[in-house]
Amino acid sequence: MENIVILTGAGISAESGLKTFRDSDGLWEGYNIEDVATPEAWARNPQMVQQFYNERRKSVLEAQPNLAHFALAKLEEKYQVTIITQNIDDLHERAGSTNVVHLHGVITRSQSSLNPALTYPINGWEIKMGETCELGSQLRAHVVWFGEAVPMIETAARICSDADIFILVGTSLAVYPAAGLINYVPRQVTRYIIDPNIPVSSGSRVVEMPYKATIGVPMLVEELMG
Ligand code: APR
């Protein structure tokens, strides 16, 4: 079985109603990263950080997977598929994908503020101040903030180096180390890029598909299933 590796970003969930980060109406237009997505922000104002992620969680729980998420799940009928996602939503899983690596965590789980390896399911949309982990420290969202380690990055790099086909969907490739993963894909492997704004310059093995995810992904999946 051929091995397909897909790296996704916020663009794949945009048509499910979840904002991207760096588009003109993106989340980082309305918030400063330094205020809500760093360990320093948490130390300064944990209530504000908690509220920011509680709101994100609420939006994710209200959102539904779209045609792009569903099309990627269908690839498993013919290929070995790994999705590496930078997204903290769980829309790939809800669409039926069974092998998803969350590089930046997942908003539907909470995390100990003392030990990032301790994570828990969340009941509902809210983590309340005063809710603690088994070590007695405040629970926070299970997401990787700027300035924190990305524990899954080595696993993800290994997965990329085993790809027979590589697909990039809806990411600006602005954030490292995730953006560097494309460099682990073997040279001879075809890279399909689905994004209205193609983020990397072309090469002979790059197939640019400058479409929205719900158009471009089903189109490519139909071709690959052909
Ligand atoms: N279909 C496909 N792609 C789209 C769509 C769409 N409907 N709408 C927007 N895009 C593309 C944009 O053109 C852009 O290239 O999605 C990309 C979104 O880029 P970012 O907002 O930078 O999101 P992402 O690349 O996922 O960000 C990476 O930054 O702050 C963080 O931790 C956060 O995981 C996130 C990381």
Image (cartoon, rainbow, N blue to C red):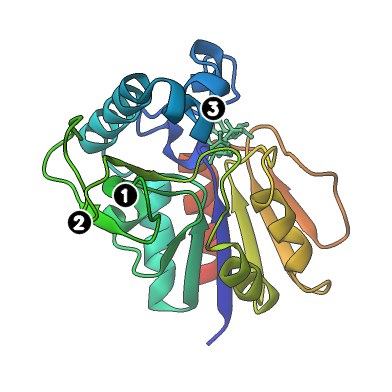
SS for callout 1? strand
SS for callout 3? loop
- Give the farthest residue toward the top: 30
Residue at mark 1: 111
Residue at mark 3: 21
Task: Say whether marks 2 and 1 touch (CB < 8 Å).
Answer: no
Q: Residues within 10 Å of mark 2 (few under 14, many from 20)?
A: few
Residue 42: x and y, percent? 43, 29
43 to 170, vertically: above or below = above
**Residue in the foreground of this view, choosing between 195 and 22:** 22
Mark 2 and mark 3 lie on one chain; the one further toward the N terminus is: 3
Is 185 displayed left or right of 66 in the figure? right
Q: Nearer the viewer, mark 1 or mark 3?
A: 1
Q: Tell me if the residue at label 3 has its CB under 8 Å from ligand 1.
A: yes
Taking the image in four quarters, ligand 1 sits in the one at top right
Image point (69%, 42%), residue name:
173
Q: Tell me which amino acid carries mark 1.
A: Gln
Residue 154: x and y, percent? 62, 69
Residue 141 in which image quadrant: top left
| Gap in angstroms between the C-alphas marked 1 and 3 | 23 Å
Residue 198: x and y, percent? 72, 38
**Residue in the foreground of this view, choosing between 149 and 14:** 149
Image point (23%, 30%), residue name:
58
Residue at mark 2: 134
Residue 115 in which image quadrant: bottom left
Q: Tell me which amino acid carries mark 3.
A: Phe
Q: Tell me if the residue at label 1 has its CB under 8 Å from ligand 1.
A: no
Residue 64 in which image quadrant: top left
Q: Nearer the viewer, mark 2 or mark 1?
A: 2
Q: Tell me which amino acid carries mark 2.
A: Glu
| Gap in angstroms between the C-alphas marked 2 and 3 | 33 Å
Label drawn at residue 28: none
